[in-house]
Amino acid sequence: MTKKLNIYNHTGITEADNKAILEAVDAGIELTIDELGRVYNEGGIYIADAEETELGNGIGCK
């Protein structure tokens, strides 16, 4: 099961993950995340790994 990725309470595992997520968000691409922390674009293609963090500490807050 996947849910919409909230960049305000998720962060990438690595800097490369953060970069991939932010580039997709900047391009207007809606991202989803599964229960294992894998991030997918609108086409269902895996692009990064992420983990949940406190609201306000995600990559969208930096």
Image: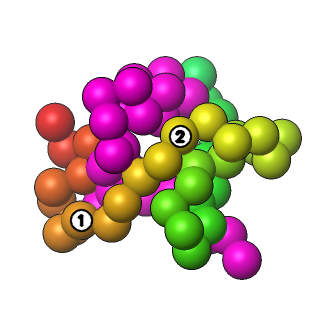
Q: Is residue 12 visible?
A: yes
- Residue 3 appears in which quarter of the rendering? bottom right
Look at the picture and state if 7 lies above or below 34: above
Percent across and percent down for residue 6 are 43, 58
The quarter of the picture where the N terminus appears is bottom right
Look at the picture and state if 3 lies above or below 42: below
Q: In the image, which is nearer the foreground, mark 2 or mark 1? A: 2
Q: CA distance from mark 2 to mark 1?
A: 16 Å
Q: Is residue 15 left or right of residue 19?
A: left
In this figure, which colouring scheme has been used for the structure?
rainbow
Mark 1 lies on a secondary structure that is loop
Magenta span includes 49: no
* Residue at 39% across, 25% down: 16
Q: Amino acid at mark 2?
A: Ala
Percent across and percent down for residue 38 are 57, 55
Look at the picture and state if 30 lies above or below 28: below
Q: Amino acid at mark 1?
A: Thr
**Disc number at residue 53?**
1
Magenta span includes 19: yes
Percent across and percent down for residue 43 are 83, 41
Q: Is residue 60 visible?
A: no
Q: Residues within 10 Å of mark 1 (few under 14, many from 20)?
A: some
* Residue at 16% across, 36% down: 62
Q: What residue does disc 2 label?
A: 48
Frontmost residue, 38 versus 29: 38
- Residue 10 appears in which quarter of the rendering? bottom left
Q: Is residue 51 left or right of residue 2?
A: left
Mark closest to the chain's N terminus, 2 or 1 = 2
Percent across and percent down for residue 2 are 67, 70
Q: Residues within 10 Å of mark 2 (few under 14, many from 20)?
A: many
Which span of residues is magenta-colored? 1-26
